[in-house]
Image: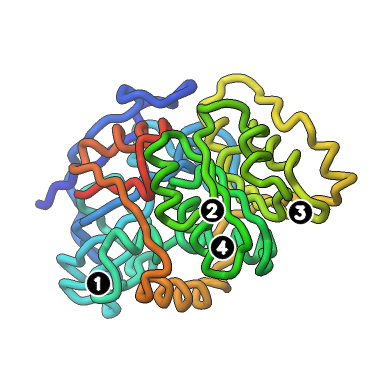
């Protein structure tokens, strides 16, 4: 009988997750049923939204259960199949990460072409990460050529793509915030017109200096003081895409910012939250454009790779601390 290694949620974190909130478990895998496939995972993703799933609260995705495996995006190789849709050796994208081997219903997996991208690319630029960046900028924030764009968490997986997509589509100026001088330098290499380290002082002041003529679009990955700063710098009829609020994910008390929300009235701002899953109808359009941008070297994407399924919890903890540049990937 085949055995698999899984990462379970041992307890719900209070504030920042710790290694004690996770447990590595070995299980016996069941025999395949008709329509199922056995996948040996190659790479898996850890993402900020997973922190919310560790709380026992109602959200757009069900919470993780204590003493049960976590899940998330992964790419692997089919090693056994009882599905007519897949052959042994096929590479597939699926949602049963946080384990080295998984039994899947074939309908929950999607075949991917590794000649067009690496396994991890389908978790990043060519996957849900890239789609999130694209739809947040274009469909949610209604980006127009000539817009001045501000991206928070800009050295992360989504943020770094947002800035580059905005430049590729004709933004007049793109500004990013990040958490270190090295990340700021990387954003400038990626074509951002300006970038600043939010540790260096008031975000509101640094953004105003970087965008003296104001901003038209804000892509929010951080919330809190970054959202407050963006509202202060927004031009009339500005648009804000609310993608994430990583500054608040580990908070144990209510966070009051933004304290200047009343400005949204007079400036006639639009603030819209979104999840990429609601925009799957744009996936084809996105895939075509992203493949072209990557092939033409218009867009680059960064990865931070952590080796080994046993180190997945530490990779996730590091992600929330900002230890990654680009997409945080666990190589299995």
Which residue: 52% across, 77% down? 285
- Residue 71: give x, y in percent of width and height: 37, 47
The mark that comes first in sequence, 1 or 2, is: 1
The label nearer to you, 1 versus 2, is: 2
Say which of 212 and 144 sits in front: 212
Q: Nearer the viewer, residue 302 or 76?
A: 302
Residue that label 4 marks: 166
- Along the horizontal axis of the image, is 193 left or right of 18? right
CA gap, disc 3 to disc 2?
19 Å
Q: Are marks 3 and 2 in contact (CB under 8 Å)?
A: no
Q: Secondary structure at mark 1?
A: loop
- Name the residue carrying label 2: 193
**Which comes sooner in the sequence, label 2 or label 4?**
4
Residue position marked by numbered label 3 in the rendering: 238
Left or right: 86 as drawn, with respect to 215 = left
Q: Earlier in the sequence, mark 3 or mark 2?
A: 2
- x, y percent for residue 113: 28, 75
User: Which numbered tag is attached to residue 114?
Assistant: 1
SS assignment at label 4: helix
Where is residue 123, by image quadrant? bottom left
Which of 115 and 10 lies nearest the eye of the viewer? Answer: 115
Marks 1 and 2, how far apart in space? Answer: 33 Å
Which dot, 3 or 2, sits closer to the camera?
Answer: 2
Labels 4 and 3: the sequence-earlier one: 4
Crowdedness of circle 4 by 10 Å Cα count: few (<14), some, many (20+)?
many
Q: Residues within 10 Å of mark 3 (few under 14, many from 20)?
A: many
Q: Residues within 10 Å of mark 2 (few under 14, many from 20)?
A: some
Q: Is residue 113 toward the left or the right of residue 186 in the image?
A: left
| Distance between the alpha carbons at the discs numbered 2 and 4 | 11 Å
Please name the residue shown 44% across and 46% down the image: 155
**Whole-number angstrom distance, CA of label 4 to CA of label 1:** 27 Å
């Amino acid at each position: 009988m085949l055995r698999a290694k899984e990462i379970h949620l041992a307890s719900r974190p209070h504030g920042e997750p710790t290694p004690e909130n996770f447990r590595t478990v070995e299980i016996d895998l069941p025999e395949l049923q008709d329509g199922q496939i056995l996948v040996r995972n190659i790479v898996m993703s850890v993402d900020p939204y997973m922190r919310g799933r560790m709380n026992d609260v109602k959200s757009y995705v069900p919470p993780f259960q204590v003493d049960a495996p976590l899940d998330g995006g992964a790419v692997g190789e089919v090693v056994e199949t009882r599905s007519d849709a897949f052959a042994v050796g096929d590479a597939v994208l699926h949602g049963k990460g946080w384990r080295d081997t998984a039994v899947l219903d074939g309908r929950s997996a999607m075949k991917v072409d590794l000649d067009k991208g690496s396994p991890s690319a389908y978790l990043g630029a060519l996957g849900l990460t890239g789609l999130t960046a694209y739809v947040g900028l274009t469909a949610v924030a209604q980006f127009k050529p000539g817009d001045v764009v501000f991206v928070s968490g800009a050295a992360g997986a989504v943020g770094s793509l947002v800035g580059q997509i905005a430049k590729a589509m004709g933004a007049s100026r793109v500004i990013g915030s990040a958490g270190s001088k090295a990340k700021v330098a990387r954003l400038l290499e990626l074509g951002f017109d300006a970038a600043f380290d939010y540790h260096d002082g008031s975000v509101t002041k640094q953004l105003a200096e970087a965008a003296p003529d104001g901003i038209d679009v804000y892509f929010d990955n951080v919330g809190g003081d970054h959202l407050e700063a963006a509202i202060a710098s927004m031009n009339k009829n500005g648009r804000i895409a609310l993608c994430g609020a990583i500054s608040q994910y580990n908070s144990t008390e209510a966070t009051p910012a933004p304290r200047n929300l009343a400005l949204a009235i007079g400036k006639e701002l639009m603030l819209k939250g979104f999840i990429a899953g609601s925009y799957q109808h744009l996936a084809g359009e996105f895939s075509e454009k992203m493949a072209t941008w990557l092939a033409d070297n218009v867009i680059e994407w960064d990865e931070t790779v952590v080796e080994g399924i046993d180190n997945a919890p530490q990779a996730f903890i590091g992600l929330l601390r900002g230890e990654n540049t680009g997409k945080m990937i666990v190589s299995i």
